[in-house]
Image (tube, rainbow, N blue to C red):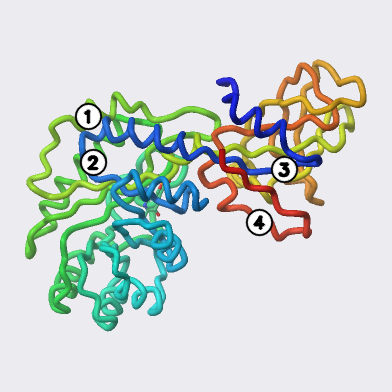
Amino acid sequence: MNPLPANVTAAVAALPSPSSAWIYDPAVLAGRLGRLREALGGHTILYAMKACANPAIVATAAALADGIECASGGELRAATAAAATRLAFSGPAKTPADLTAATRTTTPLWMHAESMRELDGLAAAGYTGPVALRVNRGRALPGTHQMTGAPTPFGIDEADVPAAVDRALAHGLDLTGFHLHAVSNCLDAHAYTAHVHDALAWSRTAATRFDLRYVNVGGGLGADPRGDQIDLAALARGLKGIDTAGAELVFEPGRYLAAPAGWYTAEVLDLKTVQGQAFALVRGGTHHFRLPAAWGYSHPFHLVPGPRHEPPWTNVDLRVCGELCTPRDILNTGQPTPHIAVGDRLVFANAGAYGWEISHDRFLHHPAPQTLII
Ligand SMILES: *Cc1c(COP(=O)(O)O)cnc(C)c1O
């Protein structure tokens, strides 16, 4: 584990007790975006804001990326409020009100249509902006969430693409290309590179009745909450000189940009041993940070000592649980811990993507976590 940045340690130490908080550093996202831009060689980067929709993070992404990818009407409003200069709108099950909002927005917007019915809805709403068909095709890529390569509800089946092209053109929609988001948390740069090449080649063959101007390969660049990440140098080598035949090549990463920009911290309220297992019970838990429970892994933690009123426990294999009345409220099933006391703060790094955003904080009416921007 890398040590905690000094500004995070200082912010954690300054929290009022008993603390639980989300801490975001937009400068980390900015740095990450700069390195990704270099690796992708000038191709378009849209930030997928569902990974982390904290307003300071979205505002930074809106200023530094080429635009914001939204997956709901609510995200469309939030991205517009964050002064995004370009929007993309994906997501299954868009409502007629969503399509109307997309039609009325004054920010340039690229629509990713997920079904035939949505094409009809766009025409009915009077939408005149660019449209790409989201297509469910291709082999599954290595990663934690496969959107393609198996029956999933995303996009239009590959076999229906000719009919969807016909439908879009019959409606007079401005059909520009395809959207081929396939995976999340892909740590294999070689496989991801192959996905990009394959997406371009397939799009060329599928764009038979219109001019191909747009190929969106989706997100999925890996940044695992346990620390591994996709090899950017290998990705850069694989994409060097790629021929898009004049089409705009678009990436829409969420996780890769947001994961290292967020930390979750929770204070130890109690320590106990049950049947030989040492437990730390924290102010907070999986209702603030659901990712470890959702995926079933142990999230590594750092320790920032609090004001200690008792001698610390030493050299324990510590299981970290939250304040919920369920045995599933586990952040870490066991981490060797040299010293720990009530009042110490545990800090979970690499938590910025799909951390707070996917959490069920209503459960049990505990207080919400604080949010800090550093
Ligand atoms: C979630 C999502 C993304 C971002 O995926 P990451 O794995 O976070 O990079 C991009 N595009 C679409 C359509 C998505 O649903």
Q: Quadrant of residue 234?
A: top left
The residue under the point 61% across, 31% down is: 8
The residue under the point 36% across, 37% down is: 33
Question: Please, what is the three-letter code of the amino acid marked with disc 3?
Answer: Ser
Which quarter of the rendering shows the C terminus? top right
Name the secondary structure under disc 2.
Answer: helix
Q: Nearer the viewer, mark 2 or mark 4?
A: 4
Q: CA distance from mark 3 to mark 2?
A: 40 Å
Q: Quadrant of residue 99?
A: bottom left
Q: CA distance from mark 2 to mark 1?
A: 9 Å
Q: Is residue 29 left or right of residue 9?
A: left
Please name the residue that numbered disc 4 is placed on: 360
Please name the residue that numbered disc 1 is placed on: 238
The residue under the point 28% across, 60% down is: 134
Report x, y in % for residue 51.
47, 48
The residue under the point 8% across, 48% down is: 246
Q: Which of marks 1 and 3 precedes in the sequence?
A: 3
Please name the residue that numbered disc 2 is placed on: 196
